[in-house]
Amino acid sequence: MYFQQGIHKFSGRNYLCFVKTDIGQDIACAISFLKQGETVAIPTETVYGLAADAMNEDAVMKIFEAKGRPTSNPLILHFPSIEAIHPYVTEFPDTLLQLATQFCPGPLTFILPKSSLVPSLITAGQETVAVRVPEHPMTLELLRSIDFPIAAPSANRYGGISPTTAQHVSSQLNERIPYILDGGACQTGLESTIIGLAEGKVIVYRLGGIPLEELSNSLGYIPEVKNDVHEGVRTSGMVKYHYATETPLHFLRKQEYKDSDGTILFSKKGTHTTSINAYFLSEDGDLNEAAKNLYAALHEMDQRHFTRIFIEEFPNIGLGKTMNDRLKRATAKFD
């Protein structure tokens, strides 16, 4: 049973805050909460998402309240298939549809013109909506069992480290949501790549789990990256300060280090340090392995209460580009 902790006002509405947050693998339980208009943390291949019925405005507002996220930051809609997306958009251009056929289900999100079915709260008043098909068996089963799409940003406090395990979610949203669906550690470990179309060309609005090189191979050209805020926030992950630890985080340069500092290093291979303050993201310099472990490393090192954390910059290729983008936003808070 869940008990009210209190009633909180958010953007002029009242919402419940729960004392008890359960963690489990009961998909039916998660569905029941969603149908009741509650929020549920769900696993995906990228990071854990905080889900609510996208057609229920009160439920969607609970996402913003639980995360402390401004409503000016749009949300991503999740569907069980590409076909299920079509009623919620007015157009799905062939170029993007071909990429969807190749990469979905998977870590690729599309910015498309929204239909009248999509509430403006989802899109922050914009005429476009972000949509994707996640690749996780539990969440796909959940999506196939309901008759509405879910809105699901990352299941963390706004601006904090994205969660890649149920425990990461609990550490940030405990007593703020009723249920966390535990699907194990996320396999990709980085948010989805977000793309749109402008003047017939693909534009990347957020670097993510599909590397730029893979998109280029499919398109025959290198898509332009527009992932900084110029005229408002077009989609998730564009704000300057994001993905941040509580402990001051800096890129690894030639600073003088103290015993109270921690370091996160790309590869164990060829590294001779035996410091207990070091965390290795990969045994032999594999970018996919490093990406899967990045947020887990940030969570763990943040909890060890170092004075500072230093992290090595990645080769600016493949998922290295995505990780460097995340770290640029995470370290900006402390620069």
Image: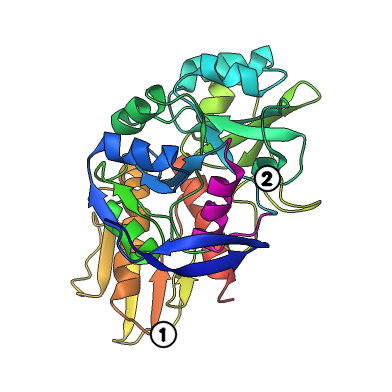
Dot 1 or dot 2, earlier in sequence: 2
Q: Which mark is residue 276?
A: none
By secondary structure, the bulk of the magenta-drawn segment is best described as helix
* Crowd class of label 2 (few under 14; some 14 to 19; many from 20; radius 10 Å): some
Confirm whether the magenta stretch covers residue 146. Answer: no
Q: Position of residue 68 (x, y in %)?
A: 55, 64
Q: Which portion, as a residue range, is magenta?
A: 55-71
Q: Which mark is residue 121?
A: 2
For the image, the number of numbered tags is 2
Determine which residue is flagged by label 1.
256
Name the foreground residue: 166 vs 35.
35
Seen in the picture, residue 69 relative to 147 is either above or below; the reply is: below
Q: Position of residue 252 (x, y in %)?
A: 44, 70
Find the distance from the CA under tag 1 to the CA under tag 2: 47 Å
Name the foreground residue: 53 vs 247.
53
Check contact, mark 1 vs mark 2: CB within 8 A. Answer: no
